[in-house]
Amino acid sequence: RLGVAHGPPGRRSATRDRASPCAGARSFRAAAATPPHLNNPGGPPLPFLSLWHDGTFGSIIPKFDGNAAAETRFDADPRSLPFGTLGAPPDHTLIIGSAGGNEIVAALHYKSKRIAGVELNPVTVHMVEHPFKSYAGDLAPQPGVHVHQGDGRSYLARQDGKYDLIWFVAPDSYAANN
């Protein structure tokens, strides 16, 4: 299998990530996405890119066409739980650990009016906003969506707004490792 990664503008040298389960993967600052035709060898392409962080599976970049209502996969998914507890669509959602945008798509599906996604890994943010922008449904300019690169706790400490839902996607902190 071949891993694909794209670094930030101006950073073109790649280093081999020998710890990656994706043999032969190249990565920039330890992030790589596996192309859809390689996500399911021998089977049909899966509707997402696998996102690897520091040599281990981290998240996905979902194939998204911009139609959040059609994303019915979330109706029977654990990602429905935060929204089901509210009883009504949240006005303002903060997603700490937005990674490849899967939870942003879920928040759009559950009709969040304003969504702030915060992702620590700058390469992950770059991948979703640049080389895989159209694949991911061009999430950043979706109405009400704002993606920020940085530490979620630090971002939250600098905000004075109110959130109806603060969603910590990964309960552990990668900040200590980066």
Image: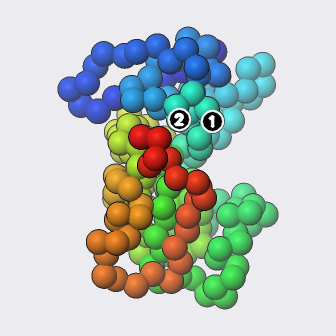
User: Closer to the camera, 88 or 97?
Assistant: 97
In terms of image quadrants, where is residue 49? top right
The numbered mark at residue 57 is 1
Residue drawn at 46 percent across, 13 percent down: 16
Q: Is residue 93 left or right of residue 87?
A: left
**Rendered view: 28 above or below 78:** above
The numbered mark at residue 53 is 2
Residue 22: x and y, percent?
62, 20
User: Closer to the camera, 98 or 153?
Assistant: 153
Q: Is residue 151 left or right of residue 8?
A: right
Label 1 with label 2: CB-CB less than 8 Å? yes
Quarter of the C terminus within the rendering:
top left
Q: Which amino acid does the dot numbered 2 rest on?
A: His
**Rendered view: 129 above or below 131:** below
Residue drawn at 69 percent across, 35 percent down: 46
Q: Which amino acid does the dot numbered 1 rest on?
A: Phe
Residue drawn at 70 percent across, 79 percent down: 84
User: Closer to the camera, 19 or 85?
Assistant: 19
For disc 2, the neighbor class at 10 Å (few under 14, some 14 to 19, many from 20) is many
SS type, badge 2: strand
